[in-house]
């Protein structure tokens, strides 16, 4: 049986969720991203894909899937306006109680929305997000965006902590990289800053926090974040930094009006302004060097002597990367056996198969999820760049399968009662055990 079955769990939530996805030239990964959203256990969703005037097959891909599933709403823009403008176009069509933001090259665990809704209710959050497990790049595969942050069962992010997390040029551990769900009643008429081509999520979340939103983060590893050469999130230019500085100035003014006594926030905003300005000065220095304008470059260094240490650090980093040989990794085909400790140990499988016991899944936002974070990271690292066959057993195995962004073949073996409520990731096959007795 193909994994596109329509069964869904009844998670007890009547909330509807509008998933908004902007896309530009994302044809290579778009279908997988879309199907991972439509394959959620919480089926009270709509997915609005706003294509930002792509010149590849993106529109055709979305239209083809929309003919199969009426919950997918295509929006095709005729002029490229950037991710903020595309997301705004999607927001105008959204009707859900919650707005979920998903990128068009990423993958969702089938239970992500179900678990985030439960966590938001428990934590009384206006915004809720989970950690992101990275894949697609061997250097980061199997790590999470928040890295070593101590989230515990959950973490309430203050406006100051949110601003402090932004390192301008490094996304690691920045709350701004997370893809939250936002209560639509709180979002109201607020929209993305369409002038921003980078950092638009950070800017919207910051404005919501300044206006009093309660933002909770849980450690669930249910958002799979693809890293690849086309990811724009990791590239800064002079124009991008100038736009970020203008948006930051707007946030400073908003904070002065809404939170005049929040000294920690104002200190964090001052520090971020300094980081942005230094980043812009550095980009101008690099441009002068590349353009062979020594007088301009020297003037930049005389005005900002600290830029010289930034330049030296950047050159040293490039040389170090050029000297380091890739770490040898086993890329042979892999068979994974996933299930509870008993099922993983006893399941029939080839002798060379890697058997992984899956711990019980706890309630979101109520207990530490370190065991599932570690499991998701190990699975993603093991599977990176190799052919993978998965044999998943029981509800635990099915849950673990969702942590793998890609595989070549997957068979999920369930008891009849489990199969009745199961939602399989797209492409997985279902095997039902004979009734007991």
Image (cartoon, rainbow, N blue to C red):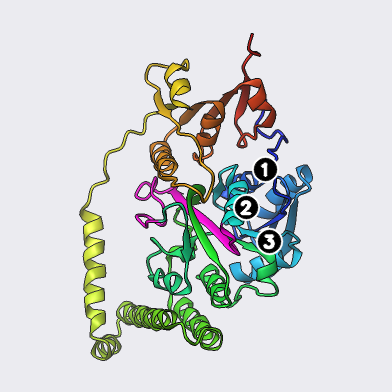
Relative to 228, is 10 on the left or the right?
right
Position in image of residue 337 (x %, y %): 45, 25
Q: Label 2 belongs to which residue?
A: 117
Q: Quadrant of residue 328?
A: top left
Relative to 252, is 36 on the left or the right?
right
Position in image of residue 66 (x %, y %): 75, 48
Calculate the distance from the C-alpha at mark 3 to the C-alpha at mark 1.
Answer: 28 Å
- Numbered circle sitting on residue 11: 1
User: Is 432 rendered above or below residue 108?
Assistant: above
Check if mark 3's residue and mark 1's residue have beta carbons within 8 Å.
no
Q: Quadrant of the C terminus?
A: top right
Q: Label 3 belongs to which residue?
A: 50
Calculate the distance from the C-alpha at mark 1 to the C-alpha at mark 2.
Answer: 9 Å
Looking at the rendered image, the disc whose residue lies closer to the viewer, 3 or 2, is 2
Position in image of residue 365 (x %, y %): 52, 51
Q: Earlier in the sequence, mark 3 or mark 2?
A: 3
Q: Which segment is the magenta one?
A: 123-150
Name the dominant secondary structure of the magenta segment. Answer: loop
Position in image of residue 200 (x %, y %): 54, 71
Q: Element at badge 3?
A: strand
Q: Which one is nearer the viewer's eye here, 81 or 166?
A: 166
Mark 2 Cα shell of 10 Å, populated few (<14), some (14-19), many (≥20): many
Mark 1 Cα shell of 10 Å, populated few (<14), some (14-19), many (≥20): some
Q: Which one is nearer the viewer's eye here, 342 or 65?
A: 342
Check if mark 1's residue and mark 2's residue have beta carbons within 8 Å.
yes
- Residue 337 in sight: no
Q: Earlier in the sequence, mark 3 or mark 1?
A: 1
């Amino acid at each position: 049986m193909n994994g596109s079955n329509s069964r869904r769990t009844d998670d007890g939530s009547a909330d509807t969720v509008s998933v908004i996805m902007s896309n530009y030239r994302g044809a290579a990964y778009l279908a997988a991203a879309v199907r991972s959203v439509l394959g959620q256990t919480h089926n009270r969703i709509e997915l609005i894909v706003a294509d930002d005037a792509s010149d590849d097959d993106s529109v055709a891909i979305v239209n083809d899937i929309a003919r199969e599933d009426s919950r997918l709403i295509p929006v095709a823009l005729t002029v490229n306006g950037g991710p903020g403008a595309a997301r705004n176009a999607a927001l105008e069509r959204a009707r859900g109680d919650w707005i979920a933001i998903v990128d068009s090259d990423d993958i969702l665990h089938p239970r992500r929305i179900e678990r985030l809704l439960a966590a938001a209710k428990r934590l009384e959050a206006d915004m809720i997000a989970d950690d992101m497990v990275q894949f697609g790049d061997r250097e980061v595969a199997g790590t999470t965006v928040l890295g070593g942050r101590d989230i515990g069962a959950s973490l309430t992010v203050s406006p100051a902590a949110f601003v402090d997390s932004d390192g301008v040029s490094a996304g690691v551990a920045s709350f701004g990289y997370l893809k939250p769900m936002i209560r639509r009643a709180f979002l109201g008429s607020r929209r993305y800053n369409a002038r921003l081509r980078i950092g638009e999520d950070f800017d919207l979340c910051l404005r919501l926090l300044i206006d009093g939103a309660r933002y909770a983060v849980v450690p669930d590893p249910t958002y799979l974040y693809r890293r690849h050469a086309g990811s724009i999130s990791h590239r800064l230019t002079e124009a991008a930094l100038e736009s970020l500085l203008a948006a930051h100035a707007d946030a400073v003014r908003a904070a002065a009006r809404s939170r005049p006594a929040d000294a920690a926030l104002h200190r964090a905003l001052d520090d971020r302004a300094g980081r942005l300005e230094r980043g812009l000065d550095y980009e101008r220095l690099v441009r002068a060097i590349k353009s062979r304008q020594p007088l301009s470059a020297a003037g930049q260094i005389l005005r900002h002597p600290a830029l010289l240490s930034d330049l030296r650090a950047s050159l040293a980093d490039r040389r170090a990367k050029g000297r380091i040989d890739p770490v040898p990794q086993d890329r042979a085909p892999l068979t994974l056996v996933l299930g509870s400790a008993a099922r993983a140990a006893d399941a029939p499988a080839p002798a060379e198969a890697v058997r992984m016991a899956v711990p019980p899944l706890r309630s979101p936002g109520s207990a530490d999820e370190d065991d599932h974070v570690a499991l998701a990271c190990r699975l993603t690292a093991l599977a990176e760049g190799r052919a993978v066959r998965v044999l998943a057993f029981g509800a635990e195995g099915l849950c673990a399968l969702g942590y793998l962004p890609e595989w070549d073949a997957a068979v999920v073996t369930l008891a009849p009662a489990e199969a009745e409520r199961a939602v399989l990731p797209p492409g997985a096959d279902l095997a039902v055990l004979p009734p007991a007795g």
